Image (spheres, rainbow, N blue to C red):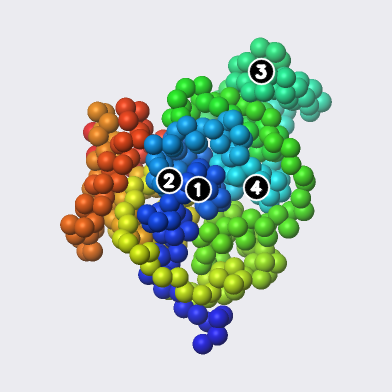
Amino acid sequence: MGDQERYIGVAERRARLALRHRLAGPARAGSPEEVAASLVALHGTDPATVYLAVGARLTDPARTVPETSRALYEDRALVRMHGMRHTVFVFPTDLTAVVHASTGLTVAARERTALLRDMAVAGAPDTAWLKEVENAALAALTRRGQATAAELAAEEPRLRQQFVYAAGKRYEGVHTVSTRLLKVLGVEGKVVRGRPLGSWTSSQFRWAVAPAHPELDPAEAQAALLRRWLTACGPATEADLKWWTGWRVTEVRRALSAIGARPVTLDEGVGYVVAGDVDSVSDPAEPWAALLPGLDPTAMGWQQRDWYLAPELRPALFDRSGNVGPTVWWNGRVVGGWAQRPDGEIVWRILVTEGVGREAEAAIAAEAERLRGWVGTTRVTPRFRTPVEKELAA
C-alpha cells in the first residue's frame, strides 16, 4: 500500500491529538508560548479560555496566570487579534503577518465597507471625516501604549459620536463610532487587544497598536497557515480545513497543493497530512485525562468531530450556536463535561457508558484538583454556557 492510500484510524488520530496538542502527561509544555505554537491558535473570544487552555497543558499549572499574562502583555510573544472566521484568537506574534494576509484582508475590506455604508445611511459624516478620526485615534494609542475606548475618546471626542443603525427595523440600534471603528481597525491588523481592566477573566480590555509586520502575498500566507495547522491537527478533511480557515474551497485546494499535502484515508473519506507526516504514531505511554475549557482549540479544531466526540453528547455540551462548553477527556475522546461551582469546587459528570472505569475516574478527579489548585478563588464562568455546565454549576 502506498503512502497516499494509508489509512489513519480513530485510535491513531487520538494519539496524534494527545501528543501534538500537549494533553498527554509527557507531552505537556513548559510555557504558554510552547502551547500556542503547538496549537497555532487559542480561541480568544472568552478571555478565560486562553488561560484555561494553557493551564491544561502546562507541566506546572501554577505558572499559568503570571506566565500567560507575561507572554501576552509584557513580552508580547502572544497577541490577541481577529483571525479566521472573523473570530478573536491568540496567536504567536510571529504569525500575525500570516494571519492578517491569509484571512484578515478579505474580512477587513468587508467590515470597513459596512461601517461606511451604515454611517452614510444614518447621515453621519463621510469617509474623509472617518479617516481623520482614525488617524487621531491611532496617534493617541501610539502615545499612550495602551488605552481603553473611553480614554481614546477623551483625546479624540469625535470617537463618541453616535449614529443609528438599521433605522426602522426590529434590530435597530445606536452605534458609537469608537466601537465600530476599533473593531474595523482590529480586523485590519492595525490594533490588537491589550491588557484587561480587571483580572485574567475580565472581558473589558485596553487596545494597543498591532505589532509591525510585513505585508505578505495572500496565497503564500494561506499556504503557510495551512501548513502550520495541518502539522498540528492533521489528518483533516477538506471540510475541516474550509471550516477552520473560513476560506473558499478553491483557496483550501490551492493551499493544499502549494504545500504538497499528502492524501490519506479516514473513516470520513479523504484526509490530508503535511508531506512527511504519513508514518504511524503510537499511543502515549500512559493513559491521560484532561479538563478543557469552553471553546478550547482541540474541542473546536475540526468540523467533523465524531472520532473524538460522540454525536449524542452534543446537545449537552454545545450551546445553540455551536459553541462547545467545558469538556472532560479520557484517552483522546470527550467523555463528559465539567463546571465550577460558586464556592470554587470543580465538578464533573461522565456522559458515556463505555470505557470509563475506575482508572479514568481517578485520573479525571486528579485533573479537577489540579485545575482548582491553580484557579484558586477566581470564579470562571464560560461566556457561552451549555446545558450540562449550567446544571453542574448550579
User: Could you say whether the residue bearing mark 4 is in a helix, strand or loop?
Assistant: helix
Q: CA distance from mark 4 to mark 3?
A: 28 Å
Q: Earlier in the sequence, mark 3 or mark 1?
A: 1
Rounded to the nearest angstrom, the CA distance separating label 3 from label 2 is 37 Å
The earlier-in-sequence mark between 1 and 2 is 1
- Between disc 3 and disc 2, whose residue precedes? 2
Q: Earlier in the sequence, mark 2 or mark 4?
A: 2
The numbered mark at residue 377 is: none
The residue labelled by disc 1 is: 35
| Residue at the image position 41 percent from the left and 46 percent from the top | 59
Amino acid type at mark 2: Leu
| First reached walking from the N terminus: tag 4 or tag 3 | 4
Along the viewing direction, whichever of 49 and 287 lies nearer the viewer: 287
Question: Can you identify the residue that label 2 sits on?
Answer: 58
Direction left: furthest residue: 358
Question: Image check: 53 left or right of 231?
Answer: left
Determine crowd level at label 3: few under 14, some 14-19, many 20+ residues with C-alpha closer than 10 A.
many
Q: Which residue is mark 4?
A: 95
Question: Are the residues flagged by discs 1 and 2 in contact, CB closer than 8 Å?
Answer: yes
